[in-house]
Amino acid sequence: MYEFLDRVDAGRKLGLALDRLKGGDVVVLGLPRGGVPVAAEVAKALDAPLDVIVVRKLGVPFQPEVAMGDIGEGETRVLDGRVVSLARVTDEDLAAVERRERALLEARLERYRKGRARTDLTGRTAVVVDDGIATGSTARAACQVARHLGAKNVVLAVPVAPAQALDSLSEADQVFSLIFARNFQAVGYCYRDFSPTRDEEVVQLLDEAKRRVHRVRAGLVAGTDQDVEIGVDGVVLHGNLHLSAHCRAVVVFAHGSGSSRHSSRNRYVASVLQGAGLGTLLLDLLTPAEEVDRTSVFDIALLGGRLGAATRWLNSKEGTAGLRVGYFGASTGAGAALWAAAESGAEVDAVVSSGGRPDLAGARLEAVRAPTLLLVGSADLQVLALNRQAMSRMTAPVRLEVIAGATHLFEEPGTLGQVAALAKGWFARYLMPEAATERNPEAAL
């Protein structure tokens, strides 16, 4: 049985459990890559800054899988003297291994921080977070590195760990886990969605955390997240609503078949839009029972009708009434988004289709008035052809962007980041024209 929906869900629960640390001089450190989405939620809950802590194993030269130590930032090095002695590793061998591993460590840090300085840990409480512990070797090294970087107290916090791990992790002052599993098999068994975390998601989470800290210091509200339930035609649809500070518009996500509001891809794109000041509503258009029925999954009229109902719900609620609305549709969700946008009186200001099937909107394509951006991978040949056909039938402003080298789900390195950036630009242009004009006065001409 799954204990967590995904890393975000695990991070929120972990953050609530660590509430006693709130108000202290805390820095939350996520272990890349999977630990960072968990750490980001913990940092939000504790109103604390977020950073990464990257460690590299120093392997014995003739047997690299055997660790003789670890390195971290700031020339930090932790050695296992017993292994070094038994393996008869010379100073020259050790220096060569460290040089190689430190170059890899620095490259990874540069990729994540983009030139930003490391958060100072001197005299502070460092909360080291991962998505779970298996052997504990990486967590031990991270705690040691945090200590060497000046942390006064080191707390290791994870959603799940083997029961026997508590006594063996002496490198931390405190070890906290929501679950200490007695019959531990693997970390991923505790998650419904344990899909890989991408480098660009780590970068986006660090960027958003930095903006959050700046907003808090400036006295601004950082934004709110809430799970919502929307009643439509006798069923209840579940979603997650995020409203940024001074929110002017909200983007509703319509996912495709086989996905959900917990999709790591949609959550990543949503985080990019949130960073631009947009609100987001990640929404399941079908109930769990309906999701296993293939006829419902491809019932575009049903999906589009519910998307329209969710939009009317937004327009009726205090806090979201009067906001501009955009749709982000993936796969079959794109057909539903365009179907809903074609409704008479639909108040939809922009649509983005990601790897979508706009052709599923059928004859309604001609009635769409909202500016529409079609994003397709160059290697997704069949869907690319369907998008070109749909584009030829539309009378609304429409643009097709082909992501080089990408397949249907944009799983290739950097391609999902391109999707998110293009979507952000499109929605900023049509949902926040005042902001675009403020940044570039010529945009209004």
Image: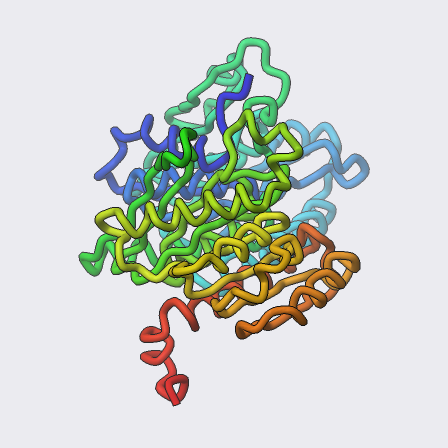
Quadrant of the image containing the N terminus: top right
Q: Is residue 199 visible?
A: no
Q: What's the residue at 32%, 29% (across, down)?
A: 16
In x, y percent, where is residue 255? 55, 45
**Relative to residue 123, is residue 361 depicted above or below?**
below
Q: Quadrant of residue 259?
A: top right
Q: Is residue 385 visible?
A: yes
Of 384 and 55, nearer the camera is 384
- The total number of labels drawn is 0
**Colour mapping:** rainbow
- Residue found at the very far right of the displayed protein: 62
Of 334 and 39, nearer the camera is 334
Q: What's the residue at 48%, 49% (across, down)?
A: 253
Q: Quadrant of residue 355?
A: bottom right
- Residue found at the very far left of the displayed protein: 219
* In this rendering, position of residue 308 left or right of residue 421: left
In x, y percent, where is residue 258? 63, 37
Quadrant of the image containing the C terminus: bottom left
* In this rendering, position of residue 51 left or right of residue 418: left
